[in-house]
Amino acid sequence: MTAERHEFQAETRSLLRLMIHSMYSNKEIFLRELVSNASDACDKLRFTATQNPEAVGDVELAVELIPDKFAGTLTVRDNGIGMTREDVVDNLGTIARSGTKKFMESLSGDQSKDAQLIGQFGVGFYSAFIVADRVTVKTRRFDSTESVVWESTGEGEYTIEAGDKAERGTEVILHLRDDEKEFLEDERLSEIVRKYSDHIGLPIKLVKSEGEPETINQARALWTRPKSEISEDDYKSFYEHLSHDYEPPLAWTHQKVEGNLEYTSLLYIPRRAPFDLWDREQQRGVKLYVKRVFIMDRAAELLPPYLRFVRGLVDTSDLPLNVSREILQGNRTVDKIRAALVKRVLDLLDDLAANKPDDFKTFWTQFGKVLKEGIVEDNANRERIAKLLRFASTTTPDAQSVSLDEYVARMPQGQEKILYLTGESPSALRNSPHLEGFRKAGYEVLLLSDRIDEWVVGHLTEYQGKKLESAARGDAEAAGKIETADKARHETEFKQVLELLPKALNSRIASARVSARLTESPSCLVAPEHGLSRQLLEILKQSGESAPDIKPILELNAEHPLVERLKETSGDETAFADLAEILYGQAVLAEGGQLEDPAGFVKRLNKLILGQGGSKILLG
Ligand code: ADP
Ligand code: MG
């Protein structure tokens, strides 16, 4: 039978071009990728063997590296699961993952960084073309009688034909480029394997031209070894193998649990968020092993979504080997393990916060928003998660660095509630009129501008017995605390103005009143005591969801000249309405909102500046 020619997908082609032409500074990772694939293939076979022992036999699973100086080839051979012809086309001819495109987009131009990204994006096999100008794959699936040969020079096409491979498994033969012959040297190969693949749970053997094949890695799954024997570097290199992340992890926790529940967990906190942290389609989770047998990648059931940044694995003897994703859902053992893992991760984060503030800061910058989801999702651990939150505040407006504990500790006497303000952006918050009175009274206000913050404060209503209160809400007790002595007098003076305002503003406000919280700005809008906050209404509107029509309260600063003028124009209906519009519009703009009629607003403002219309009164 002659070889069939196939074209690569367009995306695969551009990826290949990139590999071949630009990734020279970190070539050795091709071996990590191929060994990782070979090891995955053996894991899959081991798993199959639990259900179908006869089909698999009892040959020792291993990966072999076979350098051939004479032919100029390096072969990576495994006796794992192997591939059918269909598998080969699907896995080596196309890149099904949506990740490829994102990968191409996220390249930085820095060659060493870009090369490191390859593995993370799950396009590892193609890294073979960094060092080879031709790659041949001979493979045979364990339960098939036919073998397949795939070959490509990495230039747009590949061929497939029937082969004569007798044993199951896969051989990847790299025809090394002339200047890549270092990868035929025993020493070099051993060095790379020790660096990246020392702790995978199967032997990697170097097949030398003379003598017996030599195992060049530890060949013992790292997590099964006693903690005392494992060095920091061991943990780090295992993380690299596990995650394909080139940056060392921020922290990890390794636990062997015996008793009612038996499992070993090894969990890492990465230093950097993956490119698809916010991709909802993306499956998350840690690897699951049952009695050392690899069962599945990304077992989402083992950790809640708000800890989806955690990498690592769980190995348990309390689940059956034939466990499926369906069985994992709602399984009591899994629930117990998950609850324990959540505690471990929170302990680890507590420890980081207490003992490595810089690392915790990195963590917060990368994953803080994800952790916040836990406030909404995890009732049981809400207080613990709240302890880990960090906020910007009127004291430190530029960084999310204030913890609730710190905030509470420096609350001045007389302040009973934890004050916060939510808004679109840090800068809009910093200058918000709502803060003026609190600032003057010496109260710190937390500034929340992440989208999820509305939900966070919706669920976190209390911390250490202190209620959380929005600085932009009605006649909150908090605002009452900064009441001015003149308020009662102002209320009488402005009684008529306050009554006229709702009608003058066409009922866009529920009511108007004299404010205690403004010291500089003339006006602001606040949400009524109960019901949704203004920021949440805005988010709902923006995302096209139906939002209840809750009207705000317009608050006026009785000491502001513009408000004084408003009082003086109350006899002139048009002038009063114009000025009312300006005060209302300013309040909307100040909280980062949008005007319904911006052009009308500008016209009125210009009229005011130029002293037209009610000029006599406006110019004073
Ligand atoms: P990933 O390993 O992240 O899935 P790769 O590009 O490294 O991405 O590999 C693509 C796919 O090719 C693998 O998922 C696997 O299905 C298949 N594959 C690669 N190498 C082997 C191998 N040695 N044995 C069996 N299948 C393999
Ligand atoms: Mg791979």
Image (cartoon, rainbow, N blue to C red):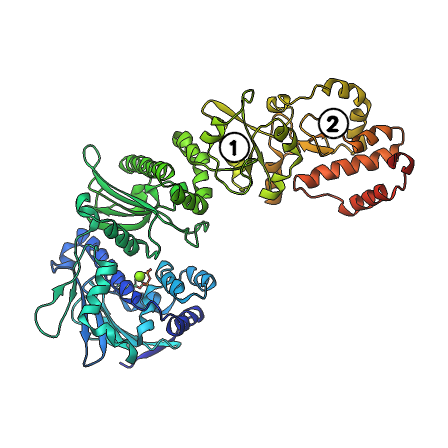
Residue at x-position 82% and y-position 42%: 604
Query: Where is residue 35, by image quadrant?
Result: bottom left
Q: Pick the residue in front: 344 or 396.
A: 396
Residue 153, given in percent of the width and then of the height, sits at 34, 78
Three-letter amino acid code at disc 2?
Answer: Ala
Query: Where is residue 552, by image quadrant?
Result: top right
Three-letter amino acid code at disc 1?
Answer: Val
In this view, 363 is above or below 460? below
Residue at x-position 81% and y-position 29%: 564
- Per the image, the residue denoted by label 1 is 457
Q: Pick the residue in front: 335 or 207.
A: 207
Residue at the limit of the structure toward the right, as seen here: 616
- Per the image, the residue denoted by label 2 is 512
SS state under label 2? strand
Q: Distance between the residues labelled 1 and 2?
A: 26 Å
Residue 28, given in percent of the width and then of the height, sits at 29, 67
Residue 104, given in percent of the width and then of the height, sits at 45, 64
Image quarter where ligand 2 lies:
bottom left
| Residues marked 1 and 2 touching at CB (< 8 Å) | no
Crowd rating for badge 1 (residues with CA inside 10 Å; few <14, some 14–19, many 20+): some
